[in-house]
Amino acid sequence: MNAGMSFGATEQDIETVLRENAAIIARPKGKPIALMATEIHAEFDAGDQERVTQAAQNAGTGIIEQIDAAHDEIRAVLVERGILKPRMAPPETR
């Protein structure tokens, strides 16, 4: 995560999100996560970066909160692209 004036998704951020969600990678094909992160980062466009930036900025002033929000937004992008499977909602309890 960039700690400067604005945030943006780095290869390291994407790799972290992939590692945290390794069990739900949709099509791993035996490719190393670091290589996947590099390829995904190259495909992140300005809109994706803006989403990550906004999520981080909207999280407040704490760096941990900003990083967590940015990673959550990266995860959302990866789900939308079919790279990660959506998380299953926990069953409702009555």
Image (cartoon, rainbow, N blue to C red):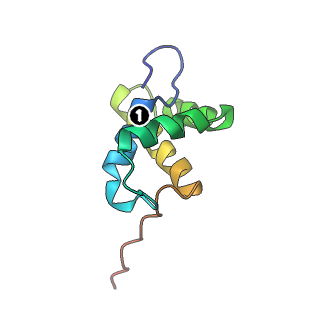
Q: Is residue 43 left or right of residue 59?
A: right
Label 1: state its secondary structure: helix
* Other residues around mark 1 within 10 Å, as few (<14) / some (14–19) / many (≥20): some
Q: Residue furthest top?
A: 4
At x 38% / y 80%, what residue is drawn?
92
Q: Nearer the viewer, residue 84 or 62?
A: 84
Horizontal side of 83 relative to 64 (left or right) equals right
Residue 68 lies, in percent from the top left, at 38, 39
Q: Quadrant of the N terminus?
A: top left
Nearest the eye: 89 or 12:
12
Q: Quadrant of residue 82?
A: bottom right
Q: In this image, 81 relative to 90: left or right?
A: right
Q: Nearer the viewer, residue 1 or 24?
A: 24
Identity of the residue drawn at 51% across and 38% down: 39
The picture places residue 49, in percent across and down from the top left corner, at 59, 32
Quadrant of res 32: top left
Q: Is residue 44 above or below residue 7?
A: below
Across and down, in percent, residue 16 comes to: 35, 39
Residue on which disc 1 sits:
13
Nearest the viewer among 47 and 89 is: 47
Please name the amino acid that badge 1 sits on.
Answer: Asp
User: Where's the C terminus, which quadrant?
Assistant: bottom left
At x 32% / y 60%, what residue is drawn? 23
Identity of the residue drawn at 37% across and 26% down: 63
